[in-house]
Amino acid sequence: MNSRINSVAVTGGFDDIRSGHIRFLQEAGRLGRLNVFLWGDALLQSISGKAPKFPQEERSYYLRAIRFVHWVLLVEGGANLNELPSVKGVRPTIWVVHEQEHTPEKQAYCQARGLDYKVVTEQELQDFPEYAPDRSNDEKTPRKKVVVTGCFDWFHSGHVRFLEEVCELGDVYVVIGHDANVRELKGPGHPLFSEQERRYMIQSIRHVKQVLISTGHGWLDAEPEILRIKPDIYAVNEDGDKPIKREFCQKHRIEYVVLRRLPKAGLQMRDSTMLRGF
């Protein structure tokens, strides 16, 4: 029986990461240990003809937080896009490309080197599969349960950093606002992304244990889910701090933690409202 773990390679700029990028990474990751060859700023600009929306450090940080990704390797300018970069210690056995990035040259490159070549079609990326959390070690290594709530309509590196910090407190359970409640609270045009897509984006982050969709209404639309989860901690950032949440936690004897809204060191502060264009 062949127990070899495939070393999978994908390449790209991954600028302004959205659900399509993550679905592609998930499909590639099903084939083995996923290595992302990330185009640096100069290379991405030479390919697209414009500066990246997000710098390479931020793109790399986000990618490294995605649970399907094993390693992120930065590719500087001058690379041949029809070949895999040579990186010491990394020997891919499969090159996975999106159908829009497929070229005969890439396929010929793989054939000449005995590598498998996989083309992922757009049709394969249309759904948003729900992630089933691994509970095998829940009783062996018990951690506190931490609940987080919010809209998360335009997921960005600031959200990643927040979830990373919350993960230091315990297992992270995220309850996102259902579409109707988000519209009620934030007005017409919200949310930009459906509750299923928003759930998928958050559950792709390795710091998160599970993501649920709220069934209540108002600022405490997540109340039914919180009572079911029975968390030890309710964590919010400064923007999400509301008196009604504090009162709820006092009533149910849940520790209430407010985290400062700070980006990862060296990265720019991000705001969903600005990114969405509102």
Image (cartoon, rainbow, N blue to C red):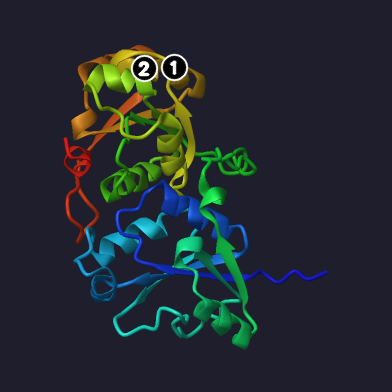
Distance from the alpha carbon under mark 1 to that under mark 2: 6 Å
Image quadrant where one finds the N terminus:
bottom right
Three-letter code for the amino acid on which mark 1 is drawn? Thr
| Proximity of marks 1 and 2: CB atoms separated by less than 8 Å | yes
Residue 250 visible in the shown view: no
Identity of the residue drawn at 55% across and 40% down = 129
142 versus 41 height, above or below: above
Identity of the residue drawn at 27% across and 65% down = 57
- Reading the image, the residue beneath label 2 is 221
Q: Secondary structure at mark 1?
A: loop
Left or right for 120, reference 15: right
Figure quadrant of residue 220: top left
Q: Residues within 10 Å of mark 1 (few under 14, many from 20)?
A: some
Q: Residues within 10 Å of mark 2 (few under 14, many from 20)?
A: many
Identity of the residue drawn at 31% across and 35% down = 153
Residue 226 visible in the shown view: yes
Badge count:
2
- Reading the image, the residue beneath label 1 is 215
Identity of the residue drawn at 27% across and 16% down = 184
Q: Secondary structure at mark 2?
A: loop
x then y, percent, for residue 150: 32, 29
